[in-house]
Image (cartoon, coloured by chain):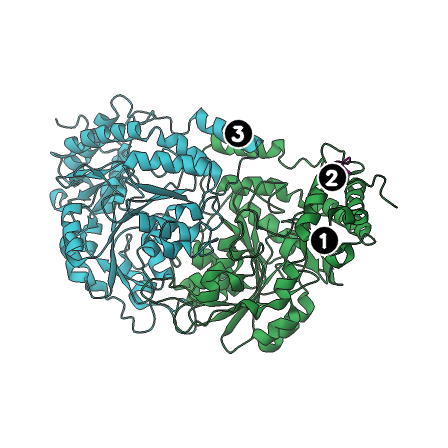
Chain colours: A green, B cyan
């Protein structure tokens, strides 16, 4: 189908998208307001890990089929507790994709260990299974994979490498609540998984309560170490510890507190009850948009590994820009033209909040100064990124830099208005057919 | 004044306290419900450290006269960030009172350092300034003091020792919002201070929002390190960093996230506006009760250092039991007799939730297994309490054990009902005059 009107909106033509609103999904519901109001009125805003925390944990464990789930105050702390549970400590290395959000591997440094970056697969922007094995050393304590944007890492080859080397896998599932691979939900495939529940329902994490998070695992020992690490003062803590070495830490555990705010947990609980429906609707939208994009020049829809079932979705629907189809049109210009048509496509992830730093808009972490050059974390020349730390050279991850230079993000809609997807596709078509007017 | 009726309630006599309710303070207010409802309705439940977080920080800094305040998700994390800001790391020692709440020194271990316990002053249950100097070694990186229960440590001698040795002081002010020493508010006397805002207003921390906390400091460098440690993704983060070494960590800082839940911050903000009034009322109550206790055998009211102005109050109003006045009546029996009279006096702090563990109800930390015997924090024989860690012997802190064996806690009222203090004092008198019937 050819586009109806050739004059680009950027050059004064009519917009492809004429709908005032693209999504009719009601993200914040009256039930959330009601729950929170009742809790504040009843003074029910602080727990020792019981009541709302346990209810949320039970419902989430059931949702993803995990044996154990522990609620925490945010997603970062769920990963922190997970790395700790796996025994990551001073002298260790953790393999982590060079592109993600910093909080995904930040805790590794706080445990005295080093992140070792790994290339991403340019088709998916997810950790490249083939590169993982090249990064393994005798110090590798864990392999950390991130199901970025709700798409699912290629867990088959990843687990094969990990199991062959006897190295546990930690899954950062902060964008992928309910996604699966070969029939197993993410967060239950590796040894342990962390989920962020941050943000505002609808535009936050797939399950969100402002600030909140969840650790999931099938492994009793890891579950107990998560409780010991950040749940001092939790009601019944000691009753949950079976390992004699853990019970020896009675009555407090190690002495920190990661519990979530009960009001955040309550909002997340209401949203969790709707996440299956939200996932189904989003998947229908993603399929419709991606099918439509297949025959439009300039863009490759997101690749999905054969056994993967993406879900959740956060940070936008990834796609790959193909400037070679459009006479080398710069990616920024392409995005501006689409935005003028009413299609909110952006060039990459998380960049706008921080601006350009080292000459690239989407910074692979090997280029970020503390990691490229090291830093004195504890002062006085101490910490995992100081003594003997070699850092990285700019050219160390060519595949990742190339992939990020092509990354696009389209909005994720949940319940598109009638005609919304068609109008968006019309925008992509218009720009693809009329790109010459922008060269 | 002799007690009116000699027969103890524990033995079937009438109760000294006949009021149905002792305190008429309305802790949770309609304004809290209103604020929270509006925020949830507006989807205003997640920030990048702006809006409610900054408002709360500004109001709190003004309240205590601090140059800088940073809101966090709980009090533990404020202390964690504070220890980090001071440069506490592997190989360091931090002097800390042997009696407190574990989260006060827990973060020291997570930074790879060792807590070194210090005796408490039996008159106040607060760190003993005279013992601090004996614990200093070349490895001492910080001295950590806790204004337990709202009473104020003897900051004059403490700062004298600290300054003489060039060691910074960190104040745990989680129970003492608004307390002062020699006219300076706690949290601004040492180098940096942490405040918990945990719990339900009225029975939680003096300022509380469910879960929340605040770091305060007068030192720009420490403020910047707090931001770097746990505020990745905070809006305008880099604009707040002046130190070139800190600016080099653009754009993310170190990669963790400690921000508070906005709904918790909002409740705390409403309560902060009332904390001056709450402090004045509680101080009037404490003075009235303590004056009345002065001439009653069996109990010594809480000692207050000459330059200290306690405030906030949490975990009860401390007092010292004197069994020698009451024929050696066991402390437990004394408490039960008071409780039967309607005076809710308990034997110590935080013990009920955990029960007896090592034969004592109030456990000095040198007796708690991970600290007395060490533990392998990171697995594989690593961590600050493993290699070369000597631990503690049960008899190491005789002064603290003796003090805790006498500790009592009475309730803190804010706005006592007419006659409430008199009825409570009548209960103390009855038990003191009739203790023989319990021997």
The residue that label 2 is drawn on is: A11
Q: How many residues crowd around disc 3 within 10 Å: few (fewer than 14), some, or many (20 or more)?
A: many
View extreme (top): residue = B418
The magenta stretch spans which residues? A10-16
Q: Secondary structure at mark 2?
A: helix
From the top left corner, tell me how far across and down residue B224 is, in percent. 36, 50
Q: Earlier in the sequence, mark 1 or mark 2?
A: 2
The reply to whether residue A8 is in sight is yes
Both marks 3 and 1 on one chain: no
Report the front residue among B250 and B268: B250
Q: Which numbered disc covers residue A414?
A: none
The residue that label 3 is drawn on is: B37
Q: How many residues crowd around disc 1 within 10 Å: few (fewer than 14), some, or many (20 or more)?
A: some
**B425 part of magenta stretch:** no
The reply to whether residue A81 is in sight is no
Report the front residue among A257 and A21: A21
At a point 47% along the width and 41% down the height, the residue shown is B261
Q: CA distance from mark 3 to mark 2?
A: 45 Å
Q: Secondary structure at mark 1?
A: loop
View extreme (right): residue = A1
Which chain letter goes with mark 2? A
Both marks 3 and 2 on one chain: no
Report the front residue among B431 and B170: B170
Along the horizontal axis of the image, is A315 left or right of A210? right
Q: Disc 1 vs disc 2: Cβ atoms closer than 8 Å? A: no
**A14 part of magenta stretch:** yes
From the top left corner, tell me how far across and down residue A185 is, in percent. 67, 58
């Amino acid at each position: 189908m050819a586009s109806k009107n050739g004059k680009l909106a950027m050059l004064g033509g009519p917009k492809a998208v004429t709908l005032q609103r693209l999504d009719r999904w009601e993200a914040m519901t009256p039930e959330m307001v009601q729950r929170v109001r009742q809790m504040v009125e009843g003074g029910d805003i602080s727990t020792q890990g019981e009541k709302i925390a346990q209810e949320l944990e039970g419902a989430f464990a059931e949702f993803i089929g995990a044996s154990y789930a522990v609620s925490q105050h945010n997603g970062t702390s769920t990963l922190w507790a997970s790395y700790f549970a796996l025994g990551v400590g001073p002298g260790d290395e953790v393999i982590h994709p060079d592109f993600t959000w910093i909080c995904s591997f930040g805790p590794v440094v706080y445990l005295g260990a080093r992140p070792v970056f790994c290339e991403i697969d340019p088709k998916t922007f997810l950790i490249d299974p083939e590169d993982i094995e090249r990064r393994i050393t005798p110090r590798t304590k864990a392999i950390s994979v991130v199901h970025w944007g709700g798409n699912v890492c290629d867990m088959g080859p990843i687990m094969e490498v990990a199991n062959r080397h006897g190295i546990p896998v930690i899954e950062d599932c902060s964008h992928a609540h309910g996604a699966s691979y070969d029939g197993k939900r993410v967060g239950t495939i590796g040894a342990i998984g962390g989920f962020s529940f941050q943000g505002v329902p609808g535009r936050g994490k797939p399950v969100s309560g402002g600030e909140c998070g969840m650790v999931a695992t099938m492994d009793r020992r890891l579950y107990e170490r998560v409780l010991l690490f950040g749940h001092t003062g939790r009601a019944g803590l000691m009753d949950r510890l079976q390992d004699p070495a853990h019970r020896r830490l009675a009555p407090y555990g190690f002495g920190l507190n990661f519990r979530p705010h009960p009001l955040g947990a309550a909002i997340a609980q209401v949203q969790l009850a709707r996440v299956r429906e939200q996932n189904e609707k989003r998947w229908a939208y993603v399929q419709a948009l991606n099918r439509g994009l297949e025959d439009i020049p300039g863009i490759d829809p997101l690749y999905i590994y054969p056994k993967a079932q993406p879900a959740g979705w956060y940070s936008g629907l990834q796609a790959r820009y193909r400037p070679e189809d459009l006479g080398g049109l710069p990616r920024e210009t392409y995005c501006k033209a689409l935005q003028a048509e009413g299609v909110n496509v952006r060039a990459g992830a998380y960049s706008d909040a921080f601006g350009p730093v080292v000459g690239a808009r989407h910074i692979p972490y090997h280029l970020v100064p503390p990691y490229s050059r090291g830093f004195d974390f504890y002062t006085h020349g101490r910490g995992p990124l100081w003594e003997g730390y070699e850092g990285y050279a700019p050219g160390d991850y060519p595949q990742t830099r190339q992939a990020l230079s092509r990354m696009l993000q389209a909005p994720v809609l949940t319940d598109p208005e009638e005609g919304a997807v068609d109008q968006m596709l019309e925008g992509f078509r218009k720009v693809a057919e009329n790109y010459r007017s922008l060269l």
